[in-house]
Image (tube, grey):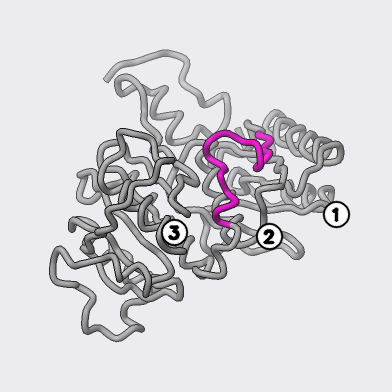
Amino acid sequence: MSEKDPLTLTITERFLEYACDLASILPSSAILVYADVFPGGEERERFIERAKPRKLCLVTRKKDFASPEGVEVIQVPEIKLTRLGQIKVAVLIGVARGLFSHEDVLVCLSGVAESGYLDALFIFDLDKEFETFALVQLEDLKEIVRPEVFQVVLSIAITLATQGREGKPIGTCFIVGDTDEVLQYCEQMVINPFRGYPENERNILDPRLEETVKEFALLDGAFIIRGDVVIETAGAYIRTGVVSADIPSGLGARHRSAAAITALTKAVAITVSQSTGTVTVFRDGKIVMEIEKPHPLGPETRWRRAFYQGPHAPSEWPHERENF
């Protein structure tokens, strides 16, 4: 289908209209829209105009996305996630930035990136939602960790969870913020690979450092990162001896250490499970959110490829199951 196909536009416009109608009758604090589904800007601009004066947030994976006037833009990792995964990450970043609180109700629209239309609508009451939204623990995070630092570390963790390193799954842990307190409970398992470098060369926001961080994720132990961007160390062992009663049984040492260190300090921890690829965020000794790695089901088929690559329109969906 072309960008102006009537069916594509009708589906998207109906979703957008319905979101505005819902926001008018719900105690909605914001409307979130996954903006990468739009092939162009006309539909988006019309929706922005209609959504006024409601708070509107556009979610995108594009680093060069131009922020429309009066609209918040939330950048999520450049990784293909499930529709719910996209929203979960956007909400997590939004809370860390102070855009949302646990009392908010959000109307969220999502779809497959660059498909040309929206196809999913979620309503999230952040105070009552399922296990993902124990978000009150993150509402003061911006006082400890710069929001852009949290966003970059979360992005690296999700990338490692979905891609691994050189084709192999990786498990790792990032402890961010309240570094002076955190370091009192740490000792090095290996020589600190960041020791001796000036702070400007240990800036987690420097894109040139991303591959270095991913490489050192192969080390046992945790990354310790200051809330003001500086990486203090990698390969650190957390010796707390504290186990949170709120942590479900069955979690490994990495997750239990992350829970313990956040219970003892004001830091936030982000773990990557080597076995499942799940990214887990901890604060105050509790799990704030889990972001599951999307797993294709069944044998390699055109259906599976179409689902994960994102068809451009219904007419392009495969109609016959084929095994390869």
Q: How far apart are labels 2 and 1 at the CA level?
A: 13 Å
Dot 2 crowding, Cα within 10 Å, few <14, some 14–19, many 20+: some
Residue to which mark 1 is pinned: 53
* Magenta span contains residue 277: no
| Mark sitting on residue 142 | none
Image spot of residue 49 (x, y percent): 83, 53
Q: Quadrant of residue 264?
A: bottom left
Q: Which residues are magenta?
A: 122-138
Q: Is residue 314 above or below residue 263?
A: above
Q: Quadrant of residue 246?
A: top left
Image spot of residue 176 (x, y percent): 40, 64
- Choose the circle earlier in sequence order: 1 or 3: 1
Image spot of residue 280 (x, y percent): 41, 46
The tally of labels here is: 3
Q: Quadrant of residue 130?
A: top right
- 227 relative to 143 in the view: left or right: left
Quadrant containing the N terminus is top right
Dot 3 crowding, Cα within 10 Å, few <14, some 14–19, many 20+: many
Disc 1 residue type (three-letter) = Pro
Q: Secondary structure at mark 2?
A: strand
Disc 2 residue type (three-letter) = Glu
Q: Residue at x 46, y 20 (%)?
A: 318
| Mark sitting on residue 72 | 2
Q: Is residue 38 above or below residue 62?
A: above
Q: Secondary structure at mark 3?
A: strand
Q: Residue at x 65, y 52 (%)?
A: 58
Pointer 1 with pointer 3, Cβ within 8 A: no
Image spot of residue 314 (x, y percent): 57, 25
- 50 relative to 183 in the view: left or right: right
Residue to which mark 3 is pinned: 268
* Viewer-nearest of discs 3 and 2: 3
